[in-house]
């Protein structure tokens, strides 16, 4: 039984559709199906592209009629995916830009090898950014997200990427943890890990290097400097890092009471 993918597909400008078509042969060879949420802004912005997806039963589409908070969006996607799949099926929770980057660059062979080698006994698993992968990211990304990892290690004794980019879990376990999540913002991804962290495994990979320059067709060094010097980018990271830290501290306190 091949694994499945669960991807929140927010793409009102159509930037990702051509990338998705380019990686589709690989997806169909290595995965059984792709579950996509389609927010209203994506459907209204790309009606022709959406019709292409609707005609291909490799995709299971879940329209979202209102612009829900990101945490509610993710919870809906993961709940629908878990309900639609066999409890033993392996589910990859990931993001389209990261997936495209891994498959359309020199990381393709390693990515596919890592995916194909996974078995149920390896799960749940966070594919974490290696030291090499983190070195490609802007420093403010690394410093702020590493702070969450450091806090988690202090509180729980495990070094985990709570702001993960690629998490793999069996559908049955995903079905169990989603009702336990209550966060409406991006910190839901950390909340999910907290409920399985006693058993979660990790694997550091280079294919989670920074994807934005490739996706946006920008010069890497120039874009990196721009992001590192941007107060707005730092504030954007803080908007989910601080709730994650708050969540970890609260979870630790509840465990000890």
Image: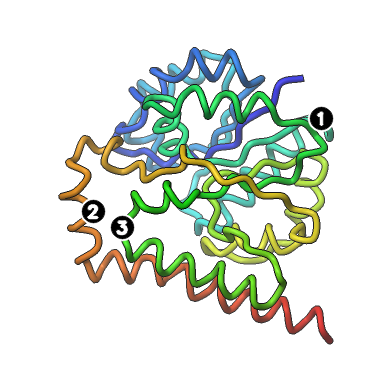
**Residue 114 coordinates in the image, percent (x, y):** 61, 30
**Residue 98 coordinates in the image, percent (x, y):** 44, 38
**Residue 210 coordinates in the image, percent (x, y):** 36, 45
- State if disc 2 and disc 1 touch (CB < 8 Å): no
Q: Is residue 37 left or right of residue 230?
A: right
Q: Which residue is mark 2?
A: 224
Q: Earlier in the sequence, mark 2 or mark 3?
A: 3
- State if disc 3 and disc 2 touch (CB < 8 Å): yes
**Pick the front one: 163 or 52:** 163
Q: Secondary structure at mark 2?
A: helix
**Pick the front one: 132 or 193:** 132
Q: Which residue is mark 3?
A: 138
Disc 2 crowd, CA 10 A, few/some/many (<14, 14-19, 20+): many
Residue that appears at 55% across and 41% down: 94
Residue that appears at 19% across and 66% down: 229
Q: Quadrant of residue 35?
A: top right
Between marks 1 and 2 in the image, the one whose residue lies nearer the viewer: 2
**Pick the front one: 16 or 90:** 90
Kindly report the distance in space between the C-alpha atoms of the residues bearing marks 1 and 2: 42 Å
Q: Is residue 64 above or below residue 21?
A: below
Q: Earlier in the sequence, mark 1 or mark 3?
A: 1
Of all residues, the one furthest to the front in this rendering is 132
Q: Which residue is mark 1?
A: 86
Residue that appears at 63% across and 21% down: 31
């Amino acid at each position: 039984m091949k694994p499945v993918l669960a991807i929140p597909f927010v793409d009102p400008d159509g930037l990702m559709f051509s990338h998705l078509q380019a990686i589709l042969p690989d997806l169909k060879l290595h995965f059984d199906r792709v579950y996509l949420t389609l927010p209203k802004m994506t459907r209204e912005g790309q009606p022709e592209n959406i019709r292409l997806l609707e005609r291909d039963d490799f995709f299971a589409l879940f329209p979202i009629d209102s612009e829900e908070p990101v945490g509610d969006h993710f919870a809906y996607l993961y709940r629908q995916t878990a309900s639609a799949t066999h409890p033993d099926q392996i589910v990859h929770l990931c993001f389209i830009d990261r997936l495209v980057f891994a498959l359309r660059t020199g990381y393709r062979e390693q990515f596919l090898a890592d995916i194909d080698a996974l078995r149920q006994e390896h799960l749940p698993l966070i594919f974490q950014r290696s030291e090499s992968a983190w070195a490609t990211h802007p420093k403010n990304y690394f410093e702020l997200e590493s702070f969450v990892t450091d806090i988690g290690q202090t509180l729980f004794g495990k070094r985990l990427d709570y702001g993960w980019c690629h998490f793999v879990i069996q559908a049955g376990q995903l079905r169990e943890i989603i009702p336990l999540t209550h966060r409406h913002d991006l910190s839901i991804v950390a909340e999910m890990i907290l409920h399985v962290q006693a058993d979660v495994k990790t694997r550091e990979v280079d294919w989670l290097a920074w994807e934005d320059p490739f996706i946006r067709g920008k010069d890497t060094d120039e874009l990196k400097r721009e992001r590192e010097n941007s107060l707005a980018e730092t504030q954007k990271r803080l908007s989910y890092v601080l709730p994650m830290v708050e969540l970890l501290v609260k979870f630790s306190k509840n465990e000890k009471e």
